[in-house]
Image: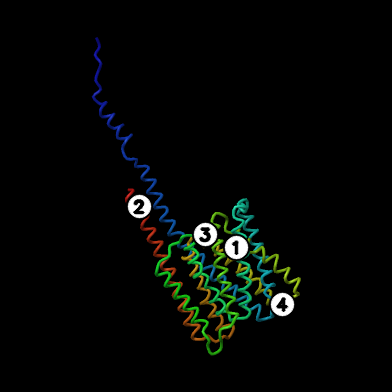
């Protein structure tokens, strides 16, 4: 009778199979580690992109402020005329970008309330800001208008649950103190009701940017086009009813067109910045435009700068810079936490 041979390698093979079946899943760990490291790199990338977009937005908004002020001072071009041109430029650029990038507008029904709020609040903010540029100095209007980072940080903490620390609260209080110093009566100026215009405009802008921040799931050009709608419709109607039309000269038309174009670019980069970074991180950088307006007042508009304006602006700038630094520390802590998770997983 033929004897059955015993396979002495079977236990070894079974043992290897057992290790494969019940041992640690190294590929799963590698995937988890890779995902965590990818999230850490995304934080760094979004931080840099948010700052770059916000710096570009600040430069373009300064050019827009300057062009509006020049248009008003040279030939008395009315603000509805300026806003009408800006609205049509914004809508034209928006349609061109949406055509090239094949933007999907099917999501409008889901975001219609937020876009409607962005459109309404943004229109009031832009209108009040343009009026303030007509009755106040360029630097005063821009400084008071840029209170929106202060409001935006508090709103982001409440609505988006963004982290806010004691240091940030102190920094925001410092910025508010700077506003008080800024509007103190000086030798050539005193507080007047017109100073409330840029303050209200800054507050409504903060609310409008909250709406933009909540629309992260749609293409960035859609909130920009939403702002252009009331400018294209309401401003021409107002011009027709009021008759406040001043004929353009080539010089004023060039300022209005450049202002409309740079205002559109500012809105685009602001929207892109809000879609990749927290409001408390990138909004304070918009104060860069205020520094440029002080230089413009001194060089082009022959406006003497009061000491209280300088000290007030420096205090505000210190406050918003502190907010940015704290937000940067928060992002670094989050990145460190992710890396620790990756090391533990490994």
Q: Would residue 28 be found to the left or right of residue 119 on screen?
A: left
Position of residue 150 measured from the top left corner of the image (x, y, whole percent): 49, 70
Indicate which disc, 2 or 4, sits on the residue closer to the N terminus: 4
Position of residue 225 measured from the top left corner of the image (x, y, whole percent): 63, 61
Q: Alpha-carbon distance for marks 2 and 3? A: 26 Å
Residue extending farthest to the top is 1
Q: Which residue is mark 2?
A: 341
71 and 122: which is toward the camera = 122
Q: Alpha-carbon distance for marks 3 and 4? A: 39 Å
Position of residue 299 relative to residue 200, above or below, is below
Mark 2 near mark 4, Cβ–Cβ under 8 Å?
Answer: no
Which disc, if any, is residue 118? 1
The mark lying in front, picked from 2 and 4, is 2
Residue positioned 37% across, 61% down in the render: 333
Element marked by disc 1: helix
Which disc, if any, is residue 249? 4
Dividing the image into 4 quarters, which one contains the N terminus? top left
Element marked by disc 3: helix
The mark lying in front, picked from 3 and 1, is 1
Residue positioned 55% across, 54% down in the render: 217
Task: Mark 2: give few (<14), some (14-19) or many (20+) Cα within 10 Å.
Answer: some
Instruction: Specify the quadrant of the image occupied by residue 20.
Output: top left
Element marked by disc 4: loop
Mark 4 near mark 1, Cβ–Cβ under 8 Å?
Answer: no
Mark 2 near mark 1, Cβ–Cβ under 8 Å?
Answer: no
Indicate which disc, 2 or 3, sits on the residue closer to the N terminus: 3
Task: Mark 3: give few (<14), some (14-19) or many (20+) Cα within 10 Å.
Answer: many
């Amino acid at each position: 009778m033929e004897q059955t041979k015993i396979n002495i390698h079977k236990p070894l093979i079974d043992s290897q199979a057992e290790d494969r079946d019940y041992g640690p899943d190294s590929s799963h760990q590698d995937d988890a580690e890779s995902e965590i490291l990818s999230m850490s790199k995304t934080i760094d990338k979004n931080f840099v992109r948010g700052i770059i977009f916000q710096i570009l937005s600040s430069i373009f908004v300064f050019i827009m402020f300057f062009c509006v002020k020049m248009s008003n001072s040279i030939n008395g071009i009315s603000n509805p005329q300026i806003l009408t041109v800006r609205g049509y430029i914004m809508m034209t650029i928006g349609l061109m970008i949406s055509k090239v990038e094949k933007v999907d507008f099917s999501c409008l029904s889901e975001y219609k309330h937020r876009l409607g709020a962005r459109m309404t609040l943004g229109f009031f903010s832009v209108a009040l800001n343009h009026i303030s540029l007509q009755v106040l100095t360029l630097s005063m209007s821009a400084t008071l208008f840029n209170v929106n980072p202060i409001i935006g940080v508090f709103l982001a903490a409440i609505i988006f649950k963004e982290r806010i620390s004691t240091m940030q609260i102190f920094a925001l209080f410092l910025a508010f103190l700077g506003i008080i110093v800024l509007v103190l009566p000086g030798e050539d100026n005193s507080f007047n009701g017109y100073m409330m215009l840029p303050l209200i405009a800054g507050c409504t802008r903060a609310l409008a940017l909250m709406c933009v921040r909540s629309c992260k799931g749609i293409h960035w050009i859609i909130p920009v086009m939403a702002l252009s709608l009331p400018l294209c419709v309401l401003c021409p109607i107002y011009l027709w009813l009021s008759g406040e039309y001043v004929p353009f000269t080539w010089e004023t038309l060039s300022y209005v067109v450049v202002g409309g174009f740079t205002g559109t670019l500012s809105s685009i980069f602001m929207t892109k910045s809000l879609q990749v970074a927290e409001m408390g991180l990138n909004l304070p950088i918009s104060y860069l435009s205020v520094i440029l307006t002080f230089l413009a007042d001194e060089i082009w508009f022959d406006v003497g700068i009061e000491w209280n304006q300088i000290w007030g602006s420096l205090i505000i700038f210190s406050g918003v810079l502190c907010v940015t630094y704290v937000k940067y520390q928060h992002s670094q802590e989050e990145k460190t936490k992710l890396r620790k998770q990756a090391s533990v997983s490994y």
